[in-house]
Amino acid sequence: MRPDNPARTGIERDPLVEFVLKDAEANVLCPATKLWNTGHGANVMREAVSLMGGYGITEDCPGFLAGKWMDAQLEATYEGPEAVQRRQLTITMTSEVFLAQFRAWTAAMRRIASTNPGSGACTLASAMQMWLWTLNHLQKATDAAGNKLYHGQRQGVTFPMADALCWLLASRCQILDVLELERRGASDPAVADSLTGTVQFLSDLCHVQAAQAAGEVGRICAELVFGYNRHPAWDDEGISCCFSACELAEYEETMPGISAFATDVLSVDGRHPRKAGPCAGCAGAESFMQLQNKLSRCLSGSRLAKDRAAQTVSAVMIPEALDYPLRASSASRAAVSTQLPRRRAT
């Protein structure tokens, strides 16, 4: 039984139940892993090359970045192109068994946040809650023309939701890995001496990644929830929802201050503000707005964690190995004393 899912305690001995649970989990994690590792990995490699400037595309660049960047493009295609992985996730991530596990994972992140508040688990749990709400909404909602939003042929909806899920699952695995290191690191002589500093550094990275995942999920979900609604126009239907200047003047006599809440006001002669139409409302998505507001506040501390991680990285230097094409001055090759353990170059 996994430590982050205690709900499976009573039924884990039943082979059939255990098979159903693992099958539902594997049907999501396998394509999600392929989609995330190759897609996000290629983006990270591109950024790594750009950090080195023109040196990054040469054979002498430390880490052989140019070759790894080219390999990343190939890995995103063979063993199943990214579109195939998204297509499979479209079907498997709506399984009731997986969604039940997903809810348990969300609750587990809340529990982890209570004991490891600096890991970003609380931020991730809020993003997971938003993703689940959006999925349930999309399966019932229709667009402005009355067409169903979530179905296999509407990949403009299903594929972004698959991408958002990959962000969540990757961040969750990162947090669980750090917790495992914290639990078992003391028994490993390679990291025991500097375990506290290492866990702190990796926890900061988890917090940064959770914040980035939450931002991506929030953007994708907001676009899908509101993007298929018709924007109000200055027609009879749109104007009927606006206040007139005369109405507000009358209301102010009995409800002082109400004019401050009026977003669109029509003048006495019927003129309206110069814009596309009245401001769109959020009817039917009030819960989403609450989740979005909560998620924004959950980002507190993420930039502080990023600054701490950057400060730690700036104090770490990997010593040069004789057989590694790393060109640096003798001063820069000296390992800097830091909280992190020194790593051997291979």
Image (cartoon, rainbow, N blue to C red):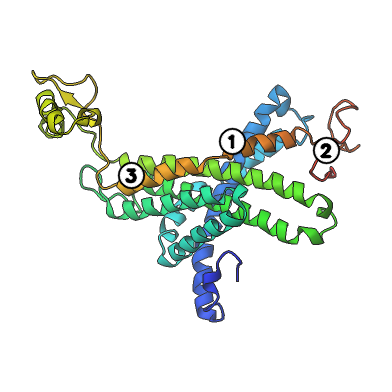
Q: What secondary structure is marked by label 2?
A: loop
Is residue 216 something that shows in the picture?
no
Q: What secondary structure is marked by label 3?
A: helix
Task: Please give left or right for residue 74 compared with residue 150 in the image.
Answer: right
Numbered badge on residue 318: 2
| Residue that label 1 marks | 303
Numbered badge on residue 77: none
Identity of the residue drawn at 65% across and 43% down = 204
Mark 1 crowdedness (10 Å alpha carbons): few <14, some 14-19, many ≥20:
some
First of labels 3, 1 by sequence position: 3
First of labels 3, 2 by sequence position: 3
Q: Residue 203 at x, y = what percent?
A: 66, 47
The answer for how far apart the CA atoms under marks 3 and 2 are is 47 Å
First of labels 1, 2 by sequence position: 1
**Front in this rendered view, residue 86 or 118:** 118
Pointers 3 and 2 in contact (C-beta within 8 Å):
no
**Front in this rendered view, residue 288 or 166:** 288
Furthest residue to the bottom? Answer: 14
Pointers 1 and 2 in contact (C-beta within 8 Å):
no
Q: Residue 109 at x, y = what percent?
A: 54, 56
Q: Amino acid at mark 2?
A: Ile
Q: Residue 270 at x, y = what percent?
A: 10, 21
The answer for how far apart the CA atoms under marks 3 and 1 are is 28 Å
Numbered badge on residue 225: 3
Identity of the residue drawn at 63% across and 32% down = 47
Is residue 342 something that shows in the picture?
yes
Q: Amino acid at mark 3?
A: Val
Q: What secondary structure is marked by label 1?
A: helix
Pointers 3 and 1 in contact (C-beta within 8 Å):
no
